[in-house]
Image (cartoon, helix red, strand yellow):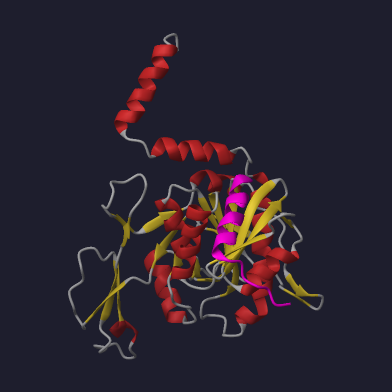
Amino acid sequence: MLREPLSRRRAMQVIQEVKQKGPYFGIIAAYPPEEIAFFASKAFEPDPNHPFVELSGRLYRVGKVFDKKVIFVRCGVGMLNAAAVAQQMIDVLDVVGILHFGIAGSANDSISFGDVTIPKQFVHTGLWDWLKPNGTLESSDFAHLDFGNFDVPKGNNLLGRVGYSSEEFFSVTGKPNLAQRLIWAKVTSQWLQLAATLEGIQLERCINSSFCLPHSTKLVVGVNGTSADIYVDNEAYRDFLFQTFQVSSVDMESFAIVMTSLSNGIPVVVIRGISDMAGKSGEEAIDTFGALAATNAVTVLLRLLNILPSSLHHYISFFNFFQQQSTSFITLILLLFFLFYPQI
């Protein structure tokens, strides 16, 4: 059925009404099979008055999962889509924490099809300085790849070399308009600790009634992940990523969502189900195991969301406000506190 888009004026009215019911946990997927798996779980209950907000061509679905108020959106593939949606959620909707889930490739042989990872940190491996053969790396480059090392026999490849550049990171806790160097974007440690309590959770290992994996699937918490606007289906590059950065999961959005959340002082966690081996398993792997990986990622997402305390919303709002104040403001608050409560 065709749906007429809301006028901007009506959309802003709906947004204000939705915000009044907040705050919310933001849930972000990127890829249609991930969205399908989320709604197939039947855990999402749409808001009876405003089941969605249409904004910038996307549907932000408003509702509850268990007792938690949530807003779900599929951002689309790639870093720019991911960052834009995360920022829009924070700026326009009353989102005080983000859970990002989806499928990913594995660069780690010990993590395979159907397994789920919750990395502790992500590195962006798509910000390159592309140099001539034997070109001089920038001082800010934290790793490099020489294409000649992959020639058979080894030689001077005209593609030269690339240096991996760090991100320019702006945040509410830093000085305005002054970027910090960022290589690893870390998820929220408190949420990671909660996620670690889920290790040992039972996950699905069967694609259908006639085909099951020969091994049980597992949740792995605390590994490293990488993101870039590159779909990795190359075993040599997969091995390079693992050896150079010790990353286990490979995707195209997570770093952007984590960095955007950190920039705004918003807690964040990432859940990625393994759909392929990033070039070691053949091109058809993602078609075969993608749905299983998405289903298992949703299972972990729901279990983690269930154990996140609802009161965390209000704590985060206060903490972020306090965190953004100047040192003099904080000193004043402390002086007033001890003035009225000298016995403490």
Q: Is residue 168 visible?
A: yes
Q: Which residues are magenta?
A: 1-22
- Residue 250 position in % (x across, y down): 49, 69
Q: Is residue 286 left or right of residue 241?
A: right
What residue lies at 49% left-to-right and 66% top-to-bottom?
Answer: 82
Q: Residue furthest right?
A: 209
Whether residue 69 is in magenta: the answer is no
What residue lies at 29% left-to-right and 87% top-to-bottom?
Answer: 154
Residue in front for this viewpoint, 338 or 116 = 338
* 89, above or below 312, in the image: below
Q: Is residue 189 left or right of residue 184?
A: right
The C terminus - image quarter: top left
Write down the quadrant of residue 23 in the picture.
Answer: top right
Q: Is residue 217 visible?
A: no
Q: Is residue 258 left or right of residue 53?
A: left
Write down the quadrant of residue 32 in the picture.
Answer: bottom right
The N terminus - image quarter: bottom right
In this rendering, the count of numbered labels is 0
